[in-house]
Image (cartoon, rainbow, N blue to C red):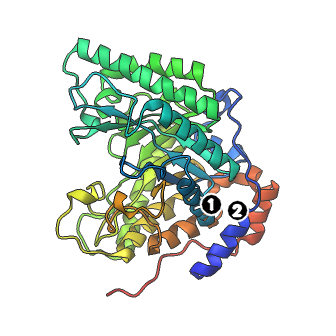
Amino acid sequence: MRSFKAARGLLLGLALIPMQVAETRADTGWLRAGGEQAWTHRAAGGVRGMTVGPIESLRHPGRGYGSEAYGRALDEAVAMGATWVSLTPFGRVGNLRSTQISLDFEAPFEENRRNILEGIHMAHQRGLNVLLVPHLWTESHEWRAEIDPGSDEGWATWSESYERFLLTWAEVAREGSAEMLSVGVELRSWVTTPRAASFFPILAKVRGVYPGLLTYSANWDDVDETLILQAIDVIGLNAFYPLADEPSVPLHVLLQGGERVAARLERLATTERKPIVLTEIGYKTVASPAVKPWIWPEDMEEVVLSQQDQAEATFALVRPLLDKPWFSGFFVWRLYADPDDVSQEPEFGFSPRGKLAERVVRDAFAAIWAADGPAFLSTPIGRHKAESAGLFFTAPHAPRR
């Protein structure tokens, strides 16, 4: 593996070259018609993405989206080799029975709207494309995938409220010229059931407001049952896949798990004839994080720190995907809008920042992918990447304690 310093120097050099920004004003029907390899024909390269999370506390003013601190987070993403960032504005839901979504989250909506628009602008200034992901925060700390208003009338009211929520952020995405919009996050109880029929009119209205690419952030274990995939452009999913059934397995076993994930996703891409983007990937900085990666850090007990295990799990998930033309890329979960604010997550959380997993992410971003395609590699940026690519995406190495 190249040294961290050498990789940083190379990627900083690449970052100085102006990025091609994906065209979002034109009709996206060509992408839907292009099938699972459509992404490779876009001449924009694969999605090398970092999620930049909001500062989830009013006690940290001036550090969220659009701030000077957020600018440092973007600079770090660029230095890692990112070409995209994902921004996640939240709406607030009381509990799983709620039928209303508040647009206010930690600050009044108009303030959040201004900050998101500035955040998109700042990303574009740095040559980064933007995925906007309107997200739901449940005050009861229950999983949004289990939302159930409880009756036909309740679901109708919920659908109307969600439509207002999504169209509001679609208008922000249009105004800011964000390149891609996620129309939902882990809405299992809605879009994997017959109630998904009520989602299609909402998507039609979104198309009337926002001209860019649409995705949907399914959960990894229900994306195959998601009924709205034909109405979006790129299949998205939050890929917290388990790669092993038991702890302390060697890397080759994790890689076998990654190969199984790749095979499953290839079947989905081929069936739906659409490219796939992983809208979130991440493993915690703990021993054997690939066994139950969906457990939130704050819910863990008896934690054993392990940067090596985090790095190996990240490598094992991503490595089998990079040579697949249907695989358009991934977003790492996550940096924060103030990269130095360590209060947002325990040290054993998902962020790869300053850890061995960051080296894995940098190497993955630096490699040439099938999704880059010959059209991208024939551009000045692509040729520069190809000419610079004495690059190999290899397993992370560090002595085990």
Decide which of 150, 78 is in the foreground and name it: 78
**Mark 2 and mark 1 in contact (Cβ < 8 Å)?**
yes
Decide which of 218, 9 is in the foreground and name it: 9
Q: Does residue 149 appear in the picture of this structure?
A: yes
Is 184 rendered above or below residue 313? above
Which residue in the protein does label 2 denote?
15
Is 263 rendered above or below residue 2? above
- Quarter-of-image position of residue 286: bottom left
Amino acid bearing label 1:
Val
Q: Residue at x 53, y 57 (%)?
A: 69
> Badge 1, how many Cα within 10 Å: few under 14, some, many 20+?
many
Which of disc 2 and disc 1 is earlier in sequence? 2
x and y percentages locating residue 154 in the rendered image: 24, 16
Q: CA distance from mark 1 to mark 2?
A: 6 Å
Is 165 rendered above or below residue 326? above
Q: Residue at x 38, y 23 (%)?
A: 162
Which residue in the protein does label 1 denote?
78
Q: Quadrant of the N terminus?
A: bottom right
- Quarter-of-image position of residue 138: top left
The secondary structure type at the circle numbered 1 is helix
The secondary structure type at the circle numbered 2 is helix
